[in-house]
């Protein structure tokens, strides 16, 4: 599985795009209001918004530097707008009109002709022809002037060094002092017939197209609400992702605010901006051949969650995640909260139905929260106490008594009942909806809290409760804990009994851009899941793929070209062993040498001909050569001079890592050992022998428990060398053997890791 982290476009394919293309505008706004921008035609965009406070202000933004697209798909930065004339038709409702005080203003941020940072405020009404809600606006950046009244308050704009510009949108009754509006205000603005003329009217843009490959993509509205759906899907398509898209609807941007977060008669459970964005997203996904899996979790932005809905610890404190600001978890036993989730689920599936998409719905990571500090289960909100009669549980880390385990079992049953009701609500409108369960293994199968699975991976989820089981484990993956990933997947399958054909895997994600190197482990984990035979693998998530410049391509499937058998003839000490390096030596005219070492480790060649001592040996050798298809298939060889390692350091503990690769050392040089002799491996941790380990593939030791930070892990073992025949022909003559001459049988070491 090949991948690359691009940082910029260098000689990759490019095209041209008109400056101010509707696809590349964004929106921004303060909580709790919402706004979304969608493209309604090749030259048109629409902003939908809802205002809750008098000081709510949304910005429709154009940036000179493309900070949002994948590095190979960005438009080129050009801050000089002086040769541009922008024109568009403006129509609006629900926002202050063009002629009003505090009406739409084009704020231009950049630097003046002397390089001093500043901003200009251009009243659009000064450049409009028409009515305050339906007008033609024309802006010539060579002559544009800020100021409210012209020419008396003119403030000439120097447009040669612009960072960004945005159009401000506010509701009637706007007041910078704040305070709630009497009722929420829903509004829209349309810019159509958008055109840019002049010498600076077009920009180069990346046009890389990665061939379609075997990975799918996940995304999330909370990370992408500010982009147009067309922009988001352009990235997915050009980066080669096909088939399904897991789309997490989020926890902070979809809801319509009112006294209880419940649906209103006028507009439904989703706010107007969210509904408009997702309708456009669904239509475009369907047109491009994608399948959308709507993902909804039990997580909700804490500031807007009704207090009775929240899961709570025994002391009454709400379940709060580590996000800033935090989200909370809805209690599965709280009737109003679960009815609300069901309404949300039906609303999103209905959007997909209207777009012609086959219905697919995922319950994303439903669980009872466990506090990260002292592992207290949040089973004590009023509804949970009434439904579960929970006994006190100070912490889920460590052993629990029978009454505490029974409490967790009741909680698990309640969680399973709530997810079943959510699925039933979706299927009531579309009986053919494919249902998915996403579970996060590092939390529900935490080795330090072994009883948590009773409440967070309940028996009620076992097949066929859902059509597809989806697993994710990114904390293990990014920590390099491949052993826990393998064990966790096996434990989930054993507990829930979904066959591989009814499983999918989400690999990722990278939270911070500084950790972009974690993509290597994520891609490797995706490959491991594919080899396990799951039905689909998704990268989590598209916003991080775009941010970090990930390019993935599907390599040809590699055939397992190793037969785990030993070379059948005893070599003795007559065999020839030749370690070799690849070194390029350049000698200058003055005799000075420059040496470049192409290989970090030696690669050994063998001639095992001296081991052929009889006609029976010749027959054995020929049969073995044919069975290996000559050099096509590798095998084991015992090097007569180098086949043991004693008390070799194979790693140092960090408190998380459990997998350590076998190595042997030659001074400061380290050689990876991939073919240890079965049963010969002995391991010590800080000098103490341990039997608590297993051997994984390619000579990896998997300890039952992660060694403490600083603990030295050593191993002693016997090993073979993976080799293959060096040539396609093997020549052995009877005359040669009878004359006492050994044939030449060259083998060459195979580098497996």
Image (spheres, rainbow, N blue to C red):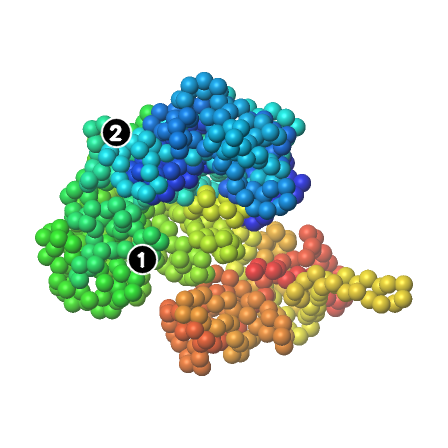
Q: Is residue 598 left or right of residue 491?
A: right
In the depicted view, which residue is nearer to us: 388 or 77?
77
Above or below, 635 against 506 in this view is: below
- Between marks 2 and 1 in the image, the one whose residue lies nearer the viewer: 2
Q: Which residue is mark 1?
A: 443
Image location of residue 580, percent across then percent down: 71, 66
Q: Which residue is mark 2?
A: 267
Above or below, 655 against 219 in this view is: below
In the depicted view, which residue is nearer to us: 395 or 214?
395
Quarter of the image for residue 171 reads top left
Taking the spot 64% from the left edge, 53% from the top edge, the residue there is 630
Image location of residue 425, percent across then percent down: 21, 35
> Mark 2 or 1 closer to N-term?
2
Residue density around tag 2, few if under 14, some if 14–19, many if 20 or more, within 10 Å: few
Taking the spot 65% from the left edge, 43% from the top edge, the residue there is 10
Spot the residue most to the bottom: 687
């Amino acid at each position: 599985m090949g991948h690359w982290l691009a940082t910029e476009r260098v000689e990759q394919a490019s095209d041209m795009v008109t400056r101010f293309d509707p696809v590349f505008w964004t929106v921004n706004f303060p909580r709790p209001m919402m706004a979304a921008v969608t493209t309604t035609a090749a030259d048109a965009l629409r902003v939908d918004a809802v205002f809750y406070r008098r000081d709510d202000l949304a910005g429709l933004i154009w940036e000179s530097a493309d900070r949002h697209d994948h590095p190979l798909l960005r438009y080129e930065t050009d801050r000089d707008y002086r040769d541009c004339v922008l024109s568009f038709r403006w129509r609006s409702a629900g926002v202050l009109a063009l002629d009003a005080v505090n009406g739409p203003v084009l704020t231009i941020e950049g630097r003046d002709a002397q390089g001093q940072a500043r901003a200009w405020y251009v009243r659009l009404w000064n450049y409009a022809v028409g009515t305050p809600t339906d007008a033609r606006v024309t802006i010539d950046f060579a002559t544009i002037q800020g100021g409210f009244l012209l020419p008396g308050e003119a403030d000439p704009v120097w447009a040669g060094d612009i960072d960004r510009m945005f159009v401000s949108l506010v509701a009637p009754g706007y007041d910078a002092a704040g305070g709630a509006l009497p009722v929420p205000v829903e509004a829209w603005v349309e810019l159509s017939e958008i055109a840019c003329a002049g010498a600076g009217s077009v920009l180069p843009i990346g046009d890389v197209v990665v061939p379609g490959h075997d990975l799918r993509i996940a995304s999330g509205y909370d990370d992408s609400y500010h982009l147009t759906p067309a922009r988001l899907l352009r990235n997915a398509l050009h980066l080669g992702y096909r088939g399904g898209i897991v789309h997490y609807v989020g926890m902070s941007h979809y809801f319509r605010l009112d006294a209880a977060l419940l649906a209103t008669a006028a507009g439904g459970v989703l706010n107007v901006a969210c509904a408009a964005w997702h309708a456009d997203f669904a239509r475009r996904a369907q047109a491009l051949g994608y399948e959308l899996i709507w993902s909804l979790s039990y997580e909700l932005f804490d500031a807007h969650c009704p207090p009775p809905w929240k899961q709570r610890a025994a002391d009454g404190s709400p379940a709060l995640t580590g996000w800033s600001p935090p989200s909370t978890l809805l209690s599965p036993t709280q009737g109003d909260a679960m009815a609300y989730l069901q309404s949300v689920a039906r609303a999103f599936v209905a959007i997909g139905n209207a777009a012609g998409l086959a219905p697919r719905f995922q319950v994303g990571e439903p669980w009872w929260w466990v506090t990260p500090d002292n592992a207290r289960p949040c089973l004590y909100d009023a509804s949970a106490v009434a439904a579960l009669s929970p006994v006190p549980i100070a912490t889920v880390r460590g052993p629990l008594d029978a009454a505490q385990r029974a409490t967790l079992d009741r909680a698990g049953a309640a969680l399973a009942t709530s997810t079943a009701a959510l699925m039933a609500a979706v299927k009531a409108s579309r009986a053919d909806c494919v249902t998915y369960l996403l579970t996060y293994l590092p939390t529900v199968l935490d080795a330090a809290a072994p009883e948590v699975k009773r409440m967070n991976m309940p028996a009620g989820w076992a097949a066929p409760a859902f059509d597809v089981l989806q697993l994710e484990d990114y904390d293990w993956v990014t920590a390099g804990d491949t052993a826990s990933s393998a064990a966790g997947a096996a434990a989930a399958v054993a507990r829930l009994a979904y066959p591989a054909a009814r499983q999918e895997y989400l690999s990722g994600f990278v939270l911070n851009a500084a950790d972009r190197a974690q993509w290597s482990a994520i891609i490797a984990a995706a490959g491991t899941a594919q080899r396990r035979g799951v039905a689909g693998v998704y990268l989590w998530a598209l916003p991080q793929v775009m941010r970090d410049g990930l390019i993935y391509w599907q390599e040809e499937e590699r055939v397992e070209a190793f037969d785990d058998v030993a070379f059948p003839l005893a070599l003795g000490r007559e065999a020839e062993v030749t370690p070799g390096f690849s070194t390029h030596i350049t000698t200058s005219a003055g005799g000075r040498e420059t040496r470049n070492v192409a290989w970090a480790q030696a690669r050994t060649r063998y001639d095992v001909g001296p081991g052929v001592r009889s006609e029976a040996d010749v027959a054995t050798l020929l049969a073995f050569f044919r069975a290996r298809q000559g050099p096509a298939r590798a095998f084991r060889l015992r090097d007569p001079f180098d086949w043991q390692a004693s008390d070799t350091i194979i790693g140092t503990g960090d408190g998380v890592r459990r997998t350590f690769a076998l190595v042997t050392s030659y001074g400061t040089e380290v050689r990876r050992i991939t073919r240890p002799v079965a049963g010969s491996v002995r391991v010590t941790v800080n000098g103490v022998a341990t039997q608590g380990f297993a051997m994984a593939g390619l000579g990896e030791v998997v300890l039952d428990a992660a060694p403490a930070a600083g603990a030295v892990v050593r191993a002693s073992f016997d090993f073979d060398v993976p080799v293959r025949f060096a040539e396609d022909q093997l020549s052995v003559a009877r005359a040669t053997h009878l004359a006492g001459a050994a044939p030449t049988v060259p083998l060459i070491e195979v580098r497996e890791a």
